[in-house]
Image (tube, rainbow, N blue to C red):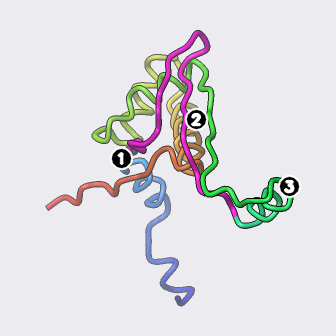
Amino acid sequence: MKKKDLQTTAPGSDRQYALACIPMRNPECIEEHNAEGILLRYSVQAKPWLRKIFKSAAGREPEIIHKKLQLDAMGSSVWQVIDGKKSVHTISRDFRKRHQLEPREAEISVSEFIQQLGKRGLVALKEPEKDG
């Protein structure tokens, strides 16, 4: 890709595009409610380096690793509204109102939280609908 090709988008358009994306939950994630908020249970493929360590220690390779993630009250409030229909922008706007935050603070908090969920395989982002 040429350097010129990388500069064809207007400043801020990547941010606007990301905010227009729609987060969707991993349907294989199990959600449990508890006193701290929501506990998410999920499975991931073992990474190659971990397989080697596990194999030398246990004599076999793990295929699946079961993990859990405890969400606090704020994380739980975001998780609950991820429905596969609302955009990141809509979720951050509602989060801002609910928690009385500045618009940019809510946008950054929600975007980073969704990004972390994505890294764990708990959510995926659907591209925004194109107008026209």
Q: Earlier in the sequence, mark 3 or mark 1?
A: 1
> Residue, x 43% and y 19% (percent of image)?
97
On the image, the x and y values in percent for residue 91 come to 40, 33
- The percent coordinates of residue 16 (x first, y second) are 42, 53
- As drawn, the residue found furthest toward the front would be 59
- The residue where tag 3 is placed is 57
Q: Quadrant of residue 28?
A: top left
Q: Nearer the viewer, mark 2 or mark 1?
A: 1
> Label 2 belongs to which residue?
109
| Earlier residue among tags 2 and 1 | 1
Among all residues in the image, which is located at the extreme top? 35
Name above or below for residue 65 compared with residue 89: below
Q: Residue at x 44, y 67 (%)?
A: 10
Magenta-drawn stretch, dominant element (helix, strand or loop): strand
**91 shown above or below 7:** above
Q: What quarter of the picture does the C terminus occupy? A: bottom left
Q: Are marks 3 and 2 in contact (CB under 8 Å)?
A: no
Identified by mark 1, the residue type is Ile
Mark 3–mark 1 Cα distance, whole angstroms, equals 42 Å
Q: Cβ–Cβ below 8 Å for labels 2 and 1?
A: no
- Most distant residue in the right direction: 57
Q: Tell me how far mark 2 sits from mark 1, CA to CA.
A: 16 Å
Few, some or many C-alpha atoms within 10 Å of disc 2 (few <14, some 14-19, many ≥20)? some
Query: Measuring 31% from the left and 41% from the top, which residue is drawn there?
Result: 84
